[in-house]
């Protein structure tokens, strides 16, 4: 078992992923509210936020989704996967420039890992 599996926020992120996979947008939103209220790992918070953005976009709450995405998009991240989360959220909001920038940054980090 990983550390993520044993912490309460690990359980919450698994539930968010599961709700997202089932297209349970209300479930994603309510679980996101729970995880937003606790202190958690930055990477888990980013993933949860991006899934919540995508869920809001799916139910045409684009303004709320943009506001939520803006809260995490300006930060710097260390791993390519973090930028992939951002890129998918940008794509769901049809923010192609933001998606492109996130993909470029993910590729830069991948290339840096290879060196």
Image (cartoon, grey):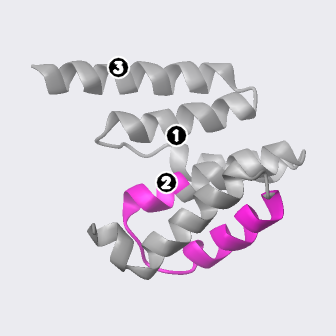
The mark found on residue 99 in the picture is none
Q: Of label 3 and label 1, which has the lower sequence position?
A: 1
**From this viewpoint, which residue is outermost toward the right?**
60
Magenta region, main secondary structure: helix
Identify the element where label 2 is drawn: helix
When the figure is inspected, residue 58 is found, relative to residue 103, above or below; the finding is below
Identify the element where label 1 is drawn: helix
Position of 112 with respect to 33 (left or right) is left
Residue located 14% across and 21% down the image: 114
The mark found on residue 85 in the picture is 1
For residue 60, what is the image quadrant?
A: top right
Q: Of label 1 and label 2, which has the lower sequence position?
A: 2
In the picture of the structure, the residue carrying the numbered disc 3 is: 107
Q: Position of residue 80 (x, y in %)?
A: 35, 33
Q: Residues within 10 Å of mark 1 (few under 14, many from 20)?
A: many
Residue located 48% across and 61% down the image: 45
When the figure is inspected, residue 6 is found, relative to residue 17, above or below; the finding is below
Residue at mark 3 to residue at mark 1: CA–CA distance: 13 Å
Residue at mark 3 to residue at mark 2: CA–CA distance: 18 Å
Q: Position of residue 26 (x, y in %)?
A: 82, 64
Residue numbers of the magenta segment: 25-47
- The answer to whether residue 52 is magenta is no
In the picture of the structure, the residue carrying the numbered disc 2 is: 46
Q: Position of residue 81 (x, y in %)?
A: 40, 37
């Amino acid at each position: 078992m990983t550390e993520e599996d044993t912490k309460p926020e690990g359980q919450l992120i698994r539930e968010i992923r599961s709700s997202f996979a089932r297209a349970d947008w209300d479930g994603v939103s309510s679980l996101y509210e729970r995880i937003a209220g606790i202190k958690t790992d930055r990477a888990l918070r980013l993933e949860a936020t991006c899934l919540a953005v995508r869920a809001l976009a799916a139910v045409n709450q684009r303004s709320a989704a943009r506001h939520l995405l803006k809260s995490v998009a300006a930060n710097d991240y260390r791993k390519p996967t973090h930028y992939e989360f951002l890129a998918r959220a940008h794509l769901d909001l049809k923010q192609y420039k933001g998606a492109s920038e996130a993909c470029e940054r993910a590729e830069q980090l991948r290339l840096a890992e290879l060196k």
